[in-house]
Amino acid sequence: MIVTTTPVIVGKNILEYKGIVSGSALGAVGASGWKISLDARNDAFNNAMQAAKAKALDALMLHAQQLGANAVVGTSFTVQVSGNFLVSATGTAVVVE
């Protein structure tokens, strides 16, 4: 499945729009990880964030497949932090040629 942040896929025509799709994943880092989470070199935080992002993306693609789509355009991610963190991915499920 093609997933892109752009509204189009170069070289592909969008044949049908299936609707907005989303996926979310909860992530967590131990208390010591939060204290230094603003440091870009914090491996524990980065690993937890990447794992949650991958799970959210998997859920997004599953949702798109359930609608009969073979691609998702306009994908974006949001992160909400409150104790743990929630990564959400949203986009538009489409059928491309």
Image: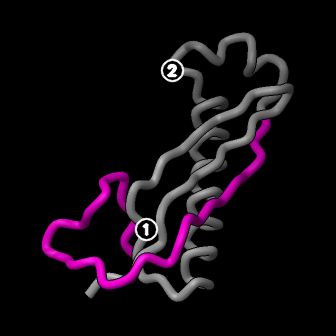
The residue shown at (79%, 37%) is 28
Chain part drawn in magenta: 1-28
- Horizontal side of 47 relative to 80 (left or right) equals left
The magenta stretch spans residue 14: yes
- Horizontal side of 83 relative to 24 (left or right) equals right
Work out whether residue 17 or residue 79 is closer to the camera in this orientation and state it.
Answer: 17
Seen as rendered, the residue at the extreme left is 11
Mark 1 sits on what residue?
Answer: 72
Mark 2 sits on what residue?
Answer: 41
The percent coordinates of residue 46 (x first, y second) are 58, 33
The residue carrying pointer 1 sits among few (fewer than 14), some (14 to 19) or many (20 or more) residues within 10 Å by Cα, namely many
The residue shown at (62%, 39%) is 49
The residue shown at (73%, 21%) is 33
Badge 1 amino acid: Val
The magenta stretch spans residue 24: yes
- Disc number lying in front (1 or 2): 1
Q: Secondary structure at mark 1?
A: strand
Badge 2 amino acid: Arg
Q: Which mark is residue 35?
A: none
Vertical position of residue 3 compared to residue 30: above or below: below
The percent coordinates of residue 81 (x first, y second) are 75, 28
Which quadrant of the structure image shows residue 64? bottom right
Vertical position of residue 7 compared to residue 93: above or below: above
